[in-house]
Every structure is written in C-alpha cells, then in structure tokens.
Amino acid sequence: MTTHDHASRPLPEADGDFYQLARTLPDDENEIRLRVRAFMEKEVQPIINEFWMRDEFPFELLPKFKALGIAGLPFQGYGCPGKSTTLMGFVMMELARVDASISTFFGVHTGLAMGSIAICGSDEQKRTWLPPMAALDKIGSFGLTEPLVGSGASGGLLTSARRDGDTWILNGQKKWIGNATWGDVTVIWARDVADNQVKGFIVENRTPGFHVDKIQHKMALRVVQNGLITMTDCRVSEANRLQNANSFKDTAQVLKMTRAAVAWESVGCATGAYEHAVRYAQERQQFGRPIASFQLVQDLLFRMLCNITSTQALCHRLSQMQDAGIMQDEHASLAKGLCTVRMRETVGWARELLGANGILLDHHVGRFVADAEALYSYEGTREMNALIVGRAITGFSAFV
C-alpha cells in the first residue's frame, strides 16, 4: 500500500496495547483504568512539561486525583478500594504512559508508604493511618535509601534507632525520598542498636528533629519532589513502630510488591514514548512522504512494540501470580530488571526516530528518556535484581 492510498482513509491510532491485554480486566476494573487514562490525558498531559521544566509538582491536580479513588488500590479494608494487583499494575502503566513522575508519586504513596503499614503494621496502626492516606488527606513517603547506603540497605543502614522507655530516638539521614518535602508522614527504616535488626517507624513529618531539604538539580523525574531527610534525636512513640517489622526480611516483603509495580510502570513509560513516536512518524514529512512510510522507521516502531508487548505480557502473568499469592522475590526482580532494560531501549529508539526533535520537551519523548533513567535504577538496580534471580535459580548466593 502506498502513501497515496491513505489520503482518503484515517490512519490507525497509536496504541501500545497491541495484544489488547486491557480487555482481560473485569468491566468494573477496566472502568477504573479508563478513568485514570482520561484524567492523565485531559488534566496532566497539557501541563506536565511546564512543571517538569520548573522542577515543581502540580498540586492543583490533587483534588481531581483524589476523586479517582485509587489511593491504596490493592489493599483490603481500612477505606482502601480492595482491587486486584493486576489492576494496580494497569493503573501504574496508565499513569506512566503520560508521566512517570505522577506514577512515582502514586507508587511511593500507595505502594511504599501505605504498603509498609498494610503489610507490617498492627490492626490499630492500619485503622489509624490507612483511611486518611486512602483519602489522600495524608500523603506518605518511604525512607530507606541513605546518602551512603543504597543497594546495601539490607545489612548496612547507618540510620539508628535507640529505645528509650516508650519512645525511640532516631538519628541519621535518608536520601531520594519522594513526596517528603511536602507530605505528612514517612515510613523510616532504621537499625535498632540493641539487636542490629532493621525496624520500621511511622514518623509524622512535623515531628521535632525531623528536617527535609529538597534535592536540587535532577535530570529525571523532576516533578517528583525528592528530599534529603535529616533526623537528629527525633523521638517516635513505640505506638508508631511498625509492630510486624522486625528485620529487613519484613522490609523486603514491601519491596517485592512495589518492585512488581515498577515493572508495570516501566512498561507505561515505554508505551508513552512509543505512542508519541508513532504519531510523530505519521505526521512528519521528509522527501515528500510521511516518515512512517519508510522501512527503517517501521523497523524501529516494530522493535519498540515488540519490547512493549512482551513486557506487558510478562507483567500480566506476574500480577496473576501476585493475586494468587505465589509471587516470590525472584519473580518480581526478574520483571523489574527486564522491563526497565527494555524500557530504556525503547525510549532511546523513540528519541532516535524523532531525530533532533527528540530532545525537545515540546515533543515529550525527551522527558520519557530522562525519566527512564530513574526508573532503571530505583527499586533495585538491574545488577541487584540479577543476583536475586541468580540465587533462586542456582541455589548459591553471590551477594557479598
């Protein structure tokens, strides 16, 4: 078919869901996905580049985001929607399809902060904290990474917790903490000096001795407001110690869940870049023809869609395992590692297709390229996830 044959017929819409996986959702869950998509396209897409450029969060969108009713999406009870983790994955993908900063804000609040309380908190702690967080009346953060401790968090946290009667005294720093500059509550992970085990604490951000500085000069996820937290003799009640978090193994249960969500998020980031590239190729003219009609451009689009479709299918099966209660650490790690590698490759091809226009915010793809770098690293680097999988398949641990 020649380009002339298209003169009288509409071109296909850019659609990253080539195998129509969204159709596998029940009608009620697909309706939620479609509401999220409409919100992102109508409210976020027109303004996000400006906020990304200014390194600011669009707080005016929070009331409409709240109205989506998706905070705490996969958790049961305590004011949470109680939907499937499969839907949680699709929502992460839809958010990141337009902007990975918004999906990261949501993932930190729902997955990491609310997830820590849902998995490691007592019933009383869940009753206290989850309802206002599900209503987005309180915004949560998650403090694990430190200035000098990243991948080695399982055995090397420098932030300390010392019990003093009915309170705990926290000292140390946490870095790269999303939502911390403006949120209400942060789950802090610290090393108990008495038994050298990692414990979790629900810390209100206005607590004396808790200070947050905004991290400046980022080149990725610029809409996310990341903080450097400094705790100096910060006193937290025993009632706010996560009662079922007694070692890093408990922390890892939270990370297993959120690592799966980041795999979906990376598919969304790749999908957004791909769909922008398709539309650009359909419109851009060179040598008197749309560049979408050239073989090498179609090959690039084919490669992008192969990456997206295969990782969508992987994530879909991962969520099925998660909903069935059979997902293990290594399953989430393989998905996060592979999906972020394929995402990085895909957004690079999208940038290549756009040529020089690919580095302009006006065409969006450059933002996806930059943000992909952050998704590639957080929630476990590719190397750390490879070691988790390697331990599972060989029976030998290569961790030092």
Image (cartoon, helix red, strand yellow):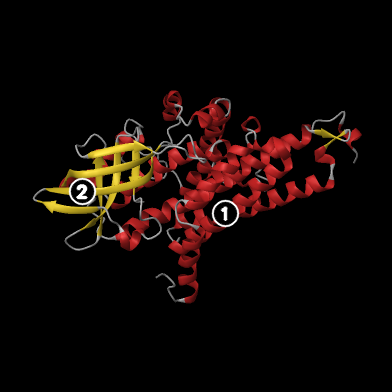
Real-space CA distance between mark 2 and mark 1, rounded to the nearest whole angstrom: 36 Å
- Which residue sits at x=46%, y=62%? 384
Is residue 120 found left or right of 299 in the rendered image?
left
Tag of residue 65: none
- Which residue is the extreme one toward the bottom? 395
Eye-nearest disc, 2 or 1: 2
Q: Find residue 296 and report its horizontal and vertical position in percent.
A: 81, 48
Tag of residue 339: 1
Q: Residues within 10 Å of mark 2 (few under 14, many from 20)?
A: many
Question: Quarter of the image containing the N terminus?
Answer: top right
The secondary structure type at the circle numbered 1 is: helix
- Residue type indicated by callout 1: Cys
The secondary structure type at the circle numbered 2 is: strand
Q: Find residue 153 and report its horizontal and vertical position in percent.
A: 35, 58
Q: Which residue in the protein does label 2 denote?
A: 170
Q: Find residue 386 and report its horizontal and vertical position in percent.
A: 50, 65
Q: Find residue 356 and report its horizontal and vertical position in percent.
A: 71, 37
Question: Quarter of the image containing the C terminus?
Answer: bottom left
Residue 108, placed above or below residue 5: below
Q: Quadrant of residue 338?
A: bottom right
Is residue 306 found left or right of 38 in the rendered image?
right
Dot 2 or dot 1: first in sequence order is 2
Q: Quadrant of residue 310?
A: bottom right
Are dots 2 and 1 in contact, CB under 8 Å?
A: no
